[in-house]
Amino acid sequence: MPNPLFDSSTPRLGLPLLFAGQTQKEGYLNETAARLDALMFLAIEGEAANPPPAPLDGQSWLISPAASGDWLGHDGQIAIRQGGNWLFALPVDGLRLLDRASGQEWRFSGGWRIPDRPALPAGGTTIDAEARAAIAGIIAALETAGVVPAA
């Protein structure tokens, strides 16, 4: 019994909303809690196209293109294992995650942004030019990571 003033889910994370007189509210509330639990401080096990053979509740993956099995049709989404089932979440701008496989943090802004490691200075006889190039690389990585605004 949706309310005409509200959608049936939140606009950013797709969390189900409760309505007055709704039956089985615990299902909606539990799904909301499960999604918040997974997405609040998101850590994925890695990126994969196929579900793992023995996932544990609380684990999440980023679904890569050409997904199959239970993940078919969910390319680019976050797969969250909860209660022995899969929940899926679309990434939204501002979402950050930790990739446990690489130890690297990613952020979503129209697509996943993963900062590159700046090259270490090597060789050269003019120390000033080498230092400037190293600093420029560090700043570019910080921009990619969203730590500092782009120029």
Image (cartoon, grey):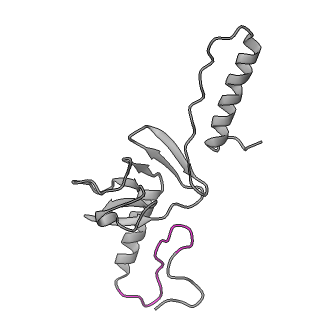
Query: Is residue 138 depicted above or below 23 in this figure?
Result: above
Q: Residue at x 49, y 64 (%)?
A: 90
Q: Identify the residue at image location x=66%, y=29%.
A: 137
Quadrant assignment, res 85? bottom left
Vertical order, 77 against 120 (above or below): below
Where in the figure is residue 99, as x and y percent of width and height?
A: 43, 44
View extreme (left): residue: 54
Q: Main secondary structure of the magenta part?
A: loop
Magenta span has 52?
no
Hey, which residue is sitting farthest top in the picture?
A: 125
Q: Does residue 79 appear to the left or right of 105 in the view shown?
A: left
Task: Say above or below: 127 vs 54.
Answer: above
Location of residue 60 in the rendering, given as x and y in whole percent from the top left corner: 37, 54
Q: Quadrant of the C terminus?
A: top right
Q: Is residue 113 visible?
A: yes
Asked whether residue 18 is drawn in magenta, I would say yes
Count numbered badges in the picture. Answer: 0
- Taking the spot 60% from the left edge, 59% from the top edge, the residue there is 93
Identify whether 120 is placed above or below 52.
above
Looking at the picture, tell me which residue is in the foreground, 22 or 126. Answer: 126
Residue 148 horizontal/vertical position (percent): 70, 41
Residue at image point 48% right, 39% down: 104
The magenta segment is: 10-23
Q: Position of residue 123 (x, y in %)?
A: 64, 11
- Is residue 147 visible in the rendered image? The answer is no
Camera-nearest residue between 17 and 70: 70
